[in-house]
Amino acid sequence: MSTNDIYIGVDGGGTKCRAVVSVNGEIKGEGLGGGANPYQNLERAKNSIETASLLALEDAGLRPTDISKAVAGLGLAGVNVPGSYKAMKDWQHPFKEMFLTGDLHTACLGAHGGDGAILVTGTGSCGYAMVNGKSLDLGGYGFPLGDQGGGAWLGLEIVKAALLSYDGLGPKTTLEDWVVGKLELRGSLLDVIERLQNQPSSEIAQLALGAFNAAKAGDPVSIKMIKEGAAYIDAQIERLRDFGAPRLTMVGGIGFLWKEWMKPENVAFVSEAQQPPEVGAVYYAQQEYKALI
């Protein structure tokens, strides 16, 4: 086997990273590691990437030492921050070659195999398009500065509305009971203050489903916030389409919930991903290595 025939693709986020091994153009193994966002924790990111890669090599029936023969493509969250990008580029990595880019880029390559767009609606939200060698980034500024349409944004809106309702300063909403029940508050709704103090955005995002359920049941407060989130998502899709993206894929845990509230023409524009982000990272490694040699 030629050493140029082994490629590793890594999709790294804040909570986990996935790696796949491609041998002679076929995906032969996969591995899972911990958080791999270098902006959050540089050393953990490096360790997680190496762990996931070694597990993928093992799954493919290769030896751990074959990592030094592999060309790796890394699509990582957090490398949009210049300092984090530089720190990862300076890493004395174990691969034959390493090519680094953002996780949105590799997710887009995986979803479309080329030009296209993705819209992320998970804990946070952001949009990305790649068309004719040019890219467009939308949002992704992080919670609470941005991430409208993401689970954490929606969870925070739920808590704010519930507290206004509790104080009698806003419309009455069933979200009061949802917050108490979902967070298992033992006292009153006011216990939410201590319960969510210094909690990560993922903890607040777990509340998001309540707004969708309450909106379906006719709660006016929930309907208003869901419509606001859907309008933001519609605007992102239209911006990405106007940029020239021929296809768009929605990724993230709550994307399917937004579709019921989006404009029909935007729902019709959404298509399923052809491949996952880690396979997109393999495509990226192959492109970059071919250009290098």
Image: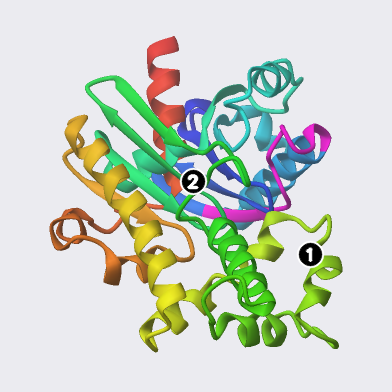
The picture places residue 176, in percent across and down from the top left corner, at 63, 82
The picture places residue 89, in percent across and down from the top left corner, at 66, 18
Identify residue type, mark 1.
Leu
The picture places residue 98, in percent across and down from the top left corner, at 59, 23
Front residue of 213/136: it is: 213
Identify residue type, mark 2.
Glu
Distance between the Cα atoms at labels 2 and 1? 33 Å
Q: Look at the image and say whether residue 32 sits in the magenta stretch.
A: yes
Front residue of 91/197: it is: 197
108 left or right, relative to 214:
left
Front residue of 144/73: it is: 144
Q: Quadrant of residue 169?
A: bottom right
Image: magenta residue range: 29-43
The residue lying at 48 percent from left, 50 percent from top is 148
Q: Which mark is residue 196?
A: 1
The residue lying at 28 percent from left, 45 percent from top is 235
Q: Which mark is residue 278?
A: 2
The residue lying at 39 percent from left, 63 percent from top is 255
Q: Residues within 10 Å of mark 1 (few under 14, many from 20)?
A: some
25 left or right, relative to 180:
left
Using the image, determine if residue 6 lies above or below residue 159: above
Residue 103 visible to the viewer: yes
The picture places residue 173, in percent across and down from the top left corner, at 53, 82
The residue lying at 35 percent from left, 55 percent from top is 250
Which residue, as the protein is rendered here, is positioned at the far top? 293
> Could you tell me which quadrant the C terminus lies in?
top left
Q: Quadrant of residue 142?
A: top right
